[in-house]
């Protein structure tokens, strides 16, 4: 689904599930009787297809108008309520991949790992995912009525069920014990545990496979491979979440994704020595990178404006002596940078007079160092910590994104890439899963490293492949893509003292924190509203 097409669908369906309130729970309905509701939208199959775009858009946009006014969620800046921006806050800023100096209430607590149940960003992510569940439930319930006369709706419903499963995957990862709601109801839902949520996500992804498309459909929509990929993630984390190792299953579904119609992007379109950067440019929906994107969220600087999404990740990472025009935008926000713990994972090719790296053999290391210090002594100063230039509003040919003002960014955000399936396969093999092959795992790792280096000089041997290497390789390949917190928890390094990074636990050199921080709290106001809920331990 090209950007102009999905935008048309979003605009047509924008009123379908209009909700503008601070969400009470995982069971929501429009609160305005005059709203044009889903009951009007589901009049025929074509309208149902338009409405499906709003289910997808719940993860990309922030309201009914954009970029501000008529927000989906109140009580937080609208741009800050967008899903991938919240994912960055909770899964990146809390780790070794980033620090941020903004003083917004609740923001300093994220990297310090001192958040509580009233943290506005923890609350907003819960609401955002709750809304996605609600939109999905409403869509599934209403579209089901048309299936007998419109068989193609089986695919649309399966896509909505995937989005709902993806939302619950995140809720299980972040909050562990949440209500499991699959139908619109006026009853206050009961709390489920992680095992129940895991079983639901697993069963949904298995059940929808025969209804999802076997081949690529419109860009921006998911096909059968997305179910394989999310199952790969699910099974890789099973031992952490439900105390049941499922690495054999992780290998099986990683393999299915790898052997599908998706492919690793290897065409160096802009001829800069690596094909990696094309994955994060403004034309990544058409420069070949899209063939690697199993699940991506679409953004268009003219037609789907938001201060979240790729606009956030591009503009917030620009500050100091950086030139916004180099990234195709009109300004920077001076926000997140990275820590030396991430930078040091890349093989350097040049150091400065202080011995700190400023150039790298691995071109996945996309850092801006001019005027930026390697060490961080004051998080509030943008110049402390290397800046990250991974995401850009430049196209492969060097031109800017569609918005002539440079205010909003076109770059699509990959949520699941085929490269991750290579890494999942390798990790599951090393963790003892059956049906995999160590030599194949090394080949997959080397394929990613060859793309990064532009040659085979960074290739590893079978003897070098162990869990520590894989964790570092995941950082090198996937940094700032929203997976790091989950990875560190799986490796028992998120809260413990076995791995420290600058300002972990609010200590300059890092310190361990309580293992209760491996999950986030259920928001306080949700607990107050729903007496069926019990707060997560430690909060």
Image (cartoon, rainbow, N blue to C red):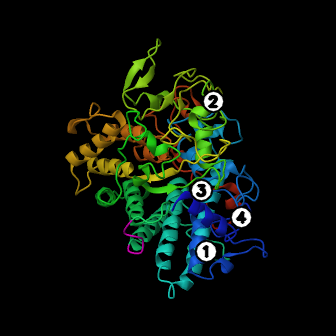
Query: Marks 4 and 2: in contact by CB < 8 Å?
Result: no
Residue occupied by mark 1: 138
**Contact (Cβ within 8 Å) of mark 3 with mark 4:** no
Residue tagged 3: 60
Looking at the picture, does residue 73 appear above or below residue 463? Answer: below
In the rendered view, tell whether residue 296 sits above or below residue 210: above
Figure check: 236 above or below 460: below
Residue 190 visible, this orientation? no
Q: Position of residue 348 (x, y in %)?
A: 38, 24
Per the picture, the main secondary structure of the magenta-coloured stretch is: loop
Residue of label 2: 319
Label 1 or label 4, whichever lies nearer to me, is 1
Distance from Cα at disc 3 to Cα at disc 4: 27 Å
- Taking the spot 36% from the left edge, 36% from the top edge, the residue there is 452
**Label 3 packing within 10 angstroms: few (<14), some (14-19), many (20+):** many
Residue at screen point 71% across, 58% down? 73
Q: Earlier in the sequence, mark 2 or mark 1?
A: 1
Q: CA distance from mark 2 to mark 1?
A: 42 Å
Residue sticking out furthest to the top: 353
Assign a secondary structure to mark 3. Answer: loop
Looking at marks 1 and 3 on the same chain, the residue that comes earlier in the sequence is marked by: 3
Disc 4 marks which residue? 529
Q: Earlier in the sequence, mark 1 or mark 4?
A: 1
Residue 289: % across, % down? 42, 49
Measured Cα–Cα span from mark 1 to mark 4: 22 Å
Residue 56 horizontal side relative to residue 243, left or right: right
Between 221 and 70, the residue placed more toward the observer is 221
| Upstream in sequence: badge 3 or badge 4 | 3
First in residue order: circle 2 vs circle 4: 2
Q: Which mark's residue is nearer the viewer, 2 or 4?
A: 2
Magenta region: 210-215
């Amino acid at each position: 689904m090209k950007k102009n097409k999905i935008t048309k669908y979003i605009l047509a369906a924008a009123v379908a599930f209009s909700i503008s309130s601070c969400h009470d729970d995982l069971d929501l309905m429009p609160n305005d009787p005059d709203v044009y509701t889903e009951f009007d939208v589901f009049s025929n199959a074509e309208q149902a297809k338009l409405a499906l775009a709003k289910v997808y858009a719940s993860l990309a946009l922030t309201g009914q108008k954009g970029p501000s006014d008529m927000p989906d969620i109140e009580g937080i800046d609208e741009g800050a309520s967008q899903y991938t921006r919240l994912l960055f806050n909770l899964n990146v800023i809390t780790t070794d991949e980033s620090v941020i100096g903004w003083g917004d209430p609740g923001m300093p607590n994220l990297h310090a790992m001192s958040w509580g149940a009233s943290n506005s960003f923890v609350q907003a992510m819960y609401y955002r995912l709750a809304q996605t569940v609600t939109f999905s439930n409403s869509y599934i319930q209403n579209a089901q009525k048309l299936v007998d006369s419109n068989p193609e709706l089986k695919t649309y419903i399966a896509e909505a069920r995937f989005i709902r499963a993806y939302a619950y995957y995140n809720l299980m990862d972040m909050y562990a014990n949440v209500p499991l709601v699959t139908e619109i109801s006026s009853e206050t839902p009961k709390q489920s545990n992680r095992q129940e949520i895991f079983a639901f996500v697993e069963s949904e992804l298995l059940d929808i496979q025969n209804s999802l498309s076997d081949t690529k459909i419109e860009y921006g929509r998911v096909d059968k491979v997305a179910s394989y990929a999310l199952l790969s993630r699910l099974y890789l984390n099973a031992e952490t979440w439900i105390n049941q190792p499922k690495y054999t299953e992780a290998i099986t579904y990683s393999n299915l994704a790898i052997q599908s119609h998706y492919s690793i992007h290897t065409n160096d379109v802009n001829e800069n020595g690596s094909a990696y950067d094309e994955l994060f440019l403004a034309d990544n929906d058409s420069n070949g990178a899209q063939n690697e994107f199993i699940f991506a969220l679409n953004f268009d600087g003219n037609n789907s404006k938001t201060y979240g999404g790729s606009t956030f990740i591009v503009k917030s990472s620009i500050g100091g002596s950086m030139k916004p025009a180099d990234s195709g935008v009109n300004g920077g926000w001076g926000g997140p940078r990275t820590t030396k713990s991430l930078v040091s994972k890349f093989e350097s090719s040049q150091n400065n007079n202080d011995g700190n790296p400023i150039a790298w053999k691995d071109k996945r290391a996309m850092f801006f160092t001019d005027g930026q210090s390697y060490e961080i002594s004051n998080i509030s100063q943008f110049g402390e910590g290397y800046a990250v230039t991974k995401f850009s509003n430049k196209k492969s040919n060097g031109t800017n994104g569609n918005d002539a003002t440079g205010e909003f960014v076109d770059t699509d955000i990959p949520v699941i890439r085929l490269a991750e399936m290579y890494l999942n396969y390798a990790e599951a093999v090393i963790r003892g899963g059956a049906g995999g092959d160590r030599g194949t795992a090394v080949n997959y790792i080397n394929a990613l490293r060859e793309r990064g280096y532009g040659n085979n000089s960074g290739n590893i041997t079978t003897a070098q492949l162990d869990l520590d290497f894989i964790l570092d390789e995941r950082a090198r390949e996937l940094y700032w893509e929203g997976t790091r917190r989950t990875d560190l928890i799986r490796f028992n390094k998120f809260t413990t003292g076995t791995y420290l990074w600058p300002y972990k636990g609010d200590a300059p050199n890092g310190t361990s924190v309580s293992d209760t921080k491996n999950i986030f709290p259920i928001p306080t106001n949700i607990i107050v509203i729903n007496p069926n809920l019990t707060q997560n331990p430690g909060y």
